Amino acid sequence: MTSLPVAAREHVRQEMVADPRVVAAIVSAVHEQVPVYAALDDSRLPEVRAIAAWGLERLLDLWVTDGALEPSDLRRLRGIAAARAADGRPVQAVLRAYRVAATVLTDEIAARAPRLAAADAFALSRMLLTALDTLSEEMTTAYAATDEDLAADRDRALRLLLDDLIAGRHASVGALSDRSARLGVQLPDPYCLLVAEPVGAERPEMALDAATGLLEALAVPGVPGVPGDEVASSATVRGSRAVLLLPGAAAARAGAVLGARSWRGCAITGESLDRFAVAHRLAADALDTAPAHAHRPGRVLTDADAHVLALLGGHPAAAPDQVARLVLGPLTDPGQRHLMEALTAYIDAGSASAAARVLHLHAQSLRYRLRRIHALTSRDPRDPWQRLTLDIARTIRP
């Protein structure tokens, strides 16, 4: 059988490039067959589709022309590899994704040219093997170089890691652990995500050195790590705000440190690392929507405040019963029923004296219970904002 003329290969190329189902088939196959890609969130899939579309067109061009990858192609492959190394996607998984894509490409060509000549099939196989060998070498080299660069500049590497956590670019906790291990650090667990900004009407772009200074002020000495590693803290900026990844113990000092600097903030401590992007969105939205009286000197907004604000905004990240547990804490225990009764009476009656009369208690006994509520929940029922959060929590509690 004679080989397809170049015009026939070109026809197949044009048909495949014009058919969006081909790229969709490649992305679907990679998503299904490569575990790291199966865990990617929707925000990462457009990038995968764009790379698949570019790779499809270039490989088909090489088949039609019997060509080879050019220097511009190699630069692009190295750039892709560097980006994947920086976001923690293992090189083995990336190379496997390209092999899966090559298999889909072969199947799609065969479906459009069922009587593919031996010469054309040989040309296709030779082109794919050569391209895969070349990209494997280029990408492996780029991975190694990127790893060296990241290890040489630890602060920058940690900042890039934090940026990727905020953007939700990590496909899995495993990929995140692999990246941390390459940097020789251990991410804090439990952790505190602190989003903070200076108080004032004007909100200029935050300088990185200001965020770094805040990080140094919040350093927690003596945090245990694993032998040979260190527990990583890091800072980056988002517009007018500093975003800090800290050990969970730092949350207790955040209010005092921010108060001394005339800053306000929101500290999230209850989300897992694989929900870091959710934690950042909660904190940022809380600072966007919290009324001025929610901010008090020496206090930062917490998970509970953030979830209440999300609930009020109509887009809760937690179920109402979870919001109630976050705000009320130990008050939900049956043994604290008397404190819940005191809280309900105080909110409904409007004063300690009136609540005491409702419950047939001495006013001092009622005030003592209010102090116990404050101690157990870190929420003062006499503070307008904290009283509102307590009121919402006891109202939506099942």
Image: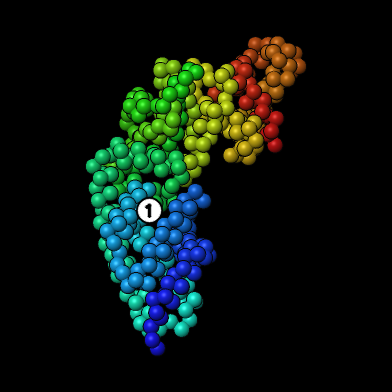
- Judge whether 78 appears above or below 292 on screen: below
Where does residue 311 sit, x and y in percent of width and height? 63, 34
Is any part of residue 193 visible from this angle?
yes
| Residue located farthest toward the bottom when viewing the structure as drawn | 1
Q: Residue at x 34, y 77 (%)?
A: 123
Where does residue 94 sit, x and y in percent of width and height? 37, 59
* Amino acid type, residue under disc 1 in the picture: Arg
Identify residue for label 1: 89
Q: Nearer the viewer, residue 366 or 173?
A: 173
Is any part of residue 362 visible from this angle?
no
Where does residue 182 sit, x and y in percent of width and height? 30, 48
107 with respect to 226 (left or right): right
Q: Which residue is drawn at 29% across and 42% down?
A: 229
Element on which disc 1 rests: loop
- Which quadrant: the C terminus? top right
Q: Residue at x 29, y 67 (%)?
A: 68
Q: Would you call the spot at circle 1 few (<14 residues within 10 Å), some (14-19), or many (20 or more)? A: many
Q: Which colour scheme is used?
A: rainbow
Q: Residue at x 23, y 42 (%)?
A: 152
Q: Nearer the viewer, residue 324 or 26?
A: 26
Q: Nearer the viewer, residue 22 or 10?
A: 10
Where does residue 78 sit, x and y in percent of width and height? 30, 54
